[in-house]
Each structure stands twice: as C-alpha cells, then as structure tokens.
Image (tube, rainbow, N blue to C red):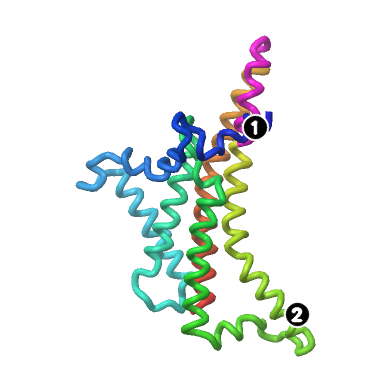
Amino acid sequence: MMTNLFSTFDPTSSLLHLPLNWLSTSIGLFMLPIMFWLMPTRSSMLWNMLLSYLNKEFKMLLTNNKNLGSTFMFLSLLTFIMFNNFMGLFPYIFTSSSHLTFTLTFAMIMWLTFMLYGWTSNTQHMFAHLVPQGTPPILMPFMVCIETISNVIRPITLSVRLAANMIAGHLLLTLLGNTGPMMLNSMFLMQILITTQIMLLLLETAVSLIQSYVFAVLTTLYSSEVN
C-alpha cells in the first residue's frame, strides 16, 4: 500500500524506466499560446501587473542593494516554482517540486552564491552578523555557534519546506481518491468525498502559490543580509 501511495512521486515511473517525468518542469512553456508573446492580451496584462507588484515588494526587501535588475532573478525563481507547483495539480503530470532533488538544487545554488559573495566582498559585515547587536560578552561564543548553524541549515529548511508542503497535499488527495471505490454503495458518502476533494484541491492551489512566494521572499531576505 505504501509503495502504491508514494509511486506518484517516483521520478522513474515511466514505460521505459527512464526519468522522463522531469520533462514536466518545462511542459508549461509548450502550453502558452503564441499570441501571449506577440501582443498584449488580458492574461499577459494581468501577469505583468502581478510581476510589477512583486517587483516593488522585492525592491523594498532589497533596500541596500543598488544593482539594477536584481529582482529579476527572484521573480524568475518565483515564476518557475509557482508554475511547477500548479502544473503538479493536474492528473498524470509529475510534480517535480515535491522532490528534494528539485528544491535543494535551487536552495543550495542560491545559498552558496550569497555566502561566497558575502564572505569575499563584505567579510567584516558577515562576521558582525554572527553576533547580534546588544549581545552580552559572555553569550557571544554561543551566539556565533547558533548563527552559524542557522546559516548552514538555511538551504535545507528552504527545500524541505517546499517539498513537504507539496507532498502532504498530494498524499491527502491520493488517499481520498483510493477510498472512492469503497463508497460506491452510498451516494451521500460519495458527495461528501467529492466535496472534500474539491475543497482540498482549492487549498492545494493556494498552497502551490503561497509556497513559491515564500521561497522567493526568503531567498530575497537572505540576499539582503549579505549586502
């Protein structure tokens, strides 16, 4: 039962026993209409309004960063993760963001980039960040250890948060879907089950959007601490 339950998260579950399911990360680019790139439509205008709002919010988080276009990287990261989270809600589409291979790759690359840039360019600031202002001298060695551990586990917390939230909702939907054949004799129970699945699907849609936003915002905050 557990093997069948987690088989939806198996990246090699294909006819050729190859990891072809990872192609789902780019399937959304093939579904966009051609007119989306050629002329402004209502959907593109709505998307541009959303991006402009997020751009302003990320600029507020990056108050000390004077580099123009620095928010483009975080907007691209948010868009890519949000798209993969949302595509995973459709049947027979592989949810790549539910794997640590996917999430840890982005988190580790971003974290290593920030750490290398911070320790090479702003070494004094990085050392000062290990001891918060107003810390008693007797607690400074402990605060250095705590801050070091918290910095090291940041990519793990980023990746596990996204993967765990995506796995939890999909497991609930799978469990409810497996109980459907046992309720065919009762129409009332079937209606309750379908209503519950619809509500859970709406919740998963919100989670897929929120988790991508949380991932991008936390990454932006980590980068603002380096500068």
Q: What's under tag 2, amino acid-wise? A: Phe
Tell me, yes or no, whether the highlighted magenta stretch contains residue 136.
no
Answer few, some or many: residues within 10 Å of disc 2's Cα (few below 14, many 20 plus, some between 14 and 19): few
Provide the residue span drawn in magenta. 171-188
Q: In the figure, 141 relative to 5: above or below?
A: below
| Residue nearer the viewer, 190 or 73 | 73
Q: Circle 2 sits on which residue?
A: 142
Tell me which residue sits at (61%, 54%) in the image: 160
- Residue 3, labelled with which disc? 1
Q: Position of residue 8 (x, y in %)?
A: 56, 34
Residue extending farthest right: 138
Q: Position of residue 118 (x, y in %)?
A: 50, 79
Q: Position of residue 173 (x, y in %)?
A: 60, 32
Dominant SS type (magenta): helix
Tell me, yes or no, whether the highlighted magenta stretch contains residue 185.
yes
Compared across the picture, whether 69 is left or right of 168 comes to: left
Task: State which tag comes first along the sequence, 2 or 1.
Answer: 1
Q: In the figure, 41 relative to 183: above or below?
A: below
Compared across the picture, whether 211 is left or right of 43 comes to: right
Q: In the figure, 65 relative to 185: above or below?
A: below
Tell me which residue sits at (50%, 52%) in the image: 212
